Image (cartoon, rainbow, N blue to C red):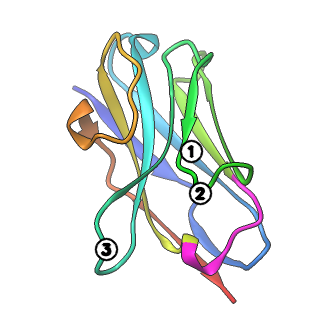
């Protein structure tokens, strides 16, 4: 059974940092790229970043480039999202998702097959 569990969200002031974790359970973690998405109230879910199964390839939304860093520890079956210089507009529920097998993935939601339950990130001004 595949599960993804996010953690690390919380309340932070603008300019602060948070690190989100996405713990994966299931087989063959390295076969799958993983992505982070976020959804603010009243808005559509939007792509934040993704990382290949090996960790060698990463992609970012323009809105987070230079501030967020995605990484993974395949020995721990975990993907991280380091978020620095946070802004109020980063406030959202953040989700991680497993990409389709043996391919790098990006912003298209239909490239992902399993999703976590989300973790709330709130940035105060």
- Give the label, 1 or 3, closer to the camera: 3
Instruction: Name the one closer to the observer, 51 or 62.
Output: 62
Which residue extends farthest bottom?
125
Mark on residue 8?
Answer: 2
> Quick one: quadrant of the C terminus?
bottom right
Instruction: Tell me the residue that label 1 is attached to.
Output: 21
> Residue 43 got which mark?
3
What is the CA distance from the residue labelled 1 to the residue labelled 2? Answer: 6 Å
In-image side of 66 versus 47 (left or right): right
Residue 34 x/y as whole percent: 43, 31
Crowding near pointer 3: few (<14 within 10 Å), some, many (20+)? Answer: few
Residue 85 appears left or right of 56: right
> How far is the residue under mark 3 from the one under mark 2?
22 Å
Lower position in the chain sequence, tag 3 or tag 2: 2
Residue that protrudes farthest toward the front in the picture? 62
Label 1: how many residues lie within 10 Å, few (<14), some (14-19) or many (20+)? many
- The residue shown at (49%, 41%) is 22
Instruction: Name the quadrant containing residue 56.
Output: top right
Secondary element at tag 3: loop
Residue at x 58% of width, y 28% of height? 58
Is there a contact, CB below 8 Å, between mark 3 and mark 2? Answer: no
- From which residue to which does the magenta span run? 83-89
Q: State if disc 2 and disc 1 touch (CB < 8 Å).
A: yes
Taking depth in this image into account, of 50 and 65 the one nearest to the observer is: 65
Q: Is residue 88 magenta?
A: yes
Of pointers 1 and 2, the one earlier in the residue sequence: 2
């Amino acid at each position: 059974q595949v599960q993804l569990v996010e953690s690390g969200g919380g309340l932070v002031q603008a300019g602060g940092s948070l690190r989100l974790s996405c713990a994966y359970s299931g087989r063959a973690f390295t076969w799958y790229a993983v992505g982070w998405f976020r959804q603010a109230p009243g808005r559509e879910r939007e792509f934040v970043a993704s990382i290949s199964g090996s960790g060698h390839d990463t992609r970012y939304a323009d809105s987070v480039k230079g501030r967020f860093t995605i990484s993974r520890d395949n020995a721990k079956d975990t993907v991280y999202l380091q978020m620095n210089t946070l802004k109020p507009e980063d406030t959202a529920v953040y989700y991680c998702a497993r990409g389709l097998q043996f391919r790098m993935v990006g912003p298209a939601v239909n490239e992902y097959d399993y999703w976590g339950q989300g973790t709330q990130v709130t940035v105060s001004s």
